[in-house]
Every structure is written in C-alpha cells, then in structure tokens.
Amino acid sequence: MCARPQGEALIAQFEQERPRLRAIAHRMLGSFAEADDALQDAWLRVEKADTSEVENPAAWLTTVVGRVCLNMLRDRKEHAFEMPDPVIDTREEPEHLAVAADEVGLAMLVVLDALKPDERLAFVLHDMFAVPFDDIAPLIDKTPTTTRQLASRARKRVQDRPQPNVDLPKQREVVNAFLRASREGDLEGLVSVLHPDVTLKAGALEVIGGRTVAGRASMFRKFATMAEVQFALIGGEAGFVTWVDGVLFSAMAFTVRDDKIVAIHVIQDKEQLAALV
C-alpha cells in the first residue's frame, strides 16, 4: 500500500502518466482539445481525492481519466459528423516516421466515434491499454461479463473497418499514384488505384464507389496548379497536406489494402487543421 503523493510528488506522478493518459483521452474523445480538457478535469479530481489506500497509482489515474471521458461522451448532444483529430506529422526523418506510424489511424478514430460510450470505454481501456474488465466494469455500472460483451461488440465493428495491410513505402507509392492521376485528370489512372468499394469521407459528405470517388478526385486537376502538396503521416497512414498561398488548406488520409485505396478521409476545417499541423 503506498502513501498518497503530496505537493510536487503528486504533480510528478500525474506528469509521469500524462502521455499515456492523454492517449487514452484522445482515443475516447477523438479530439486533442477535449482530451486536454479531460486531463484538466481529472487533475482537479486527483487533487481532491484521498489516495492513501491506492495501491497502483497508474491504474487509479487511468480509471479517473476513463470516468471523466465517459461522462463527457454521455453529455455530448447529437451533432453533425465531425472528423476526429489524427496525429499529423510532415517530418520525414526515420525516427519521426517510426513514431508517427504507431499512431491510431483516422479510420479507427471514425469507427470509435460511432460506438456507444460504454462500448468505447470498454474497448479502448481493455483492447488498447490492457485494463482488466474487473477494473472497467465499475466505471459503467456493469458486471465484468457484460463489460466483456460490450468490448466484444465494439471489437467486431473495429475489425470491420478498412485496414491497411501494406508497408509505409508501398502506401506512399499508391498515394503518389493517386495524386499524379488526380493532377493529370486521369480518370482511369484513378480508378486503377481505388478499390471498387472505396469510401471518401469529408465532413458530412460521404462518397462510395471507385468511379464516383475518381470523378470527384479528377477535379483536383484545376486546384493542383494553385496548391503546394506535402507528404504526411496522418494517424500513422500515408497521406498529404495541401497549402494554398501559404495557408494550410486540407489534409487527406488514405487507407491502402492490397495495393488499392479502400478509404479516404479529408479534413478541411481551418481551426481543426491549425491545431493539428
């Protein structure tokens, strides 16, 4: 049994766990700004809590952040779809690419956003951070068995999402082929790198089907002469960001499977982009 940290020791304990706690909050909420709000709320709770009987501070902090995020999810009102915040890294040094490639993908965040709050908590804490079901169950007032079932339901939806199965250089090669065909207005070239059931999601807009998506992408030709395009890792997957007159205009993330693009996610919200890049 460990004594409750006091003063600087308490701050040090929380700061030591901050990167992991922020990662949990980001996967729970899909927004870095909301994740930071959740950590601030959690810290206020930690300051007031009696931790004299806490045997595992890291696990206890995880449950505090999990409960805060769950409450935030439950309090959310119905709203139009908003693209989650992925990690965007435009640096191409090997050490940066290796770290960024481990980030949760944008396609994963979109699926997580569609889960019910209890399902999301059970899946994120158990499957992503190895928290036992016995520790998660009290947070949602369920039995461990029911909590396991919630995580299983969420896991099935996550596994059904488009998933990349090629290495990063190959992803980049396919994305570059897409960009080249878009710039040239090459409809057949676009179709050749798109899966027949590819989905393109940009805010509330969703387009499905290789030729339909290719038709929209071919219009990029008119825009290409004005835009500067920069390769980026977006949520650990190959993509690119575009700049117009020195101003960040958009970010596009691609999920590549069997050398075909199976999903495209576009972020164009200026405030969201400014916070990510």
Image (cartoon, helix red, strand yellow):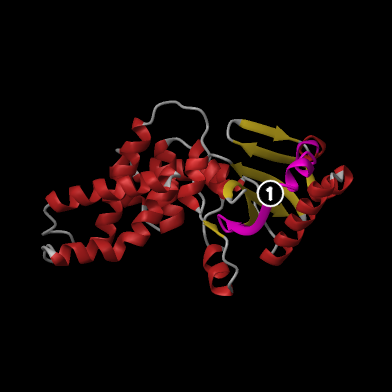
Q: Residue 173 in the image: x percent, y percent?
A: 75, 61
Say whether residue 46 is left or right of residue 193. left
Residue 129 magenta: no
Q: Quadrant of the N terminus?
A: bottom left
At 82% from the left and 37% from the top, the residue drawn is 211
Count residues near mark 1 (Cα–Cα under 10 Å), then give few for <14, some for 14-19, many for 20+: some
Q: Is residue 151 left or right of residue 143?
A: right
Q: Secondary structure at mark 1?
A: strand
- Kind of residue at disc 1: Ala
Relative to residue 66, is residue 71 depicted above or below?
above
The percent coordinates of residue 114 (x first, y second) are: 51, 36
The residue sitting at 41% across, 53% down in the picture is: 126
Q: Residue at x 35, y 33 (%)?
A: 74
Residue most extreme to the right: 188
In this picture, residue 164 sits left or right of residue 9: right
Q: Which residues are magenta?
A: 215-237
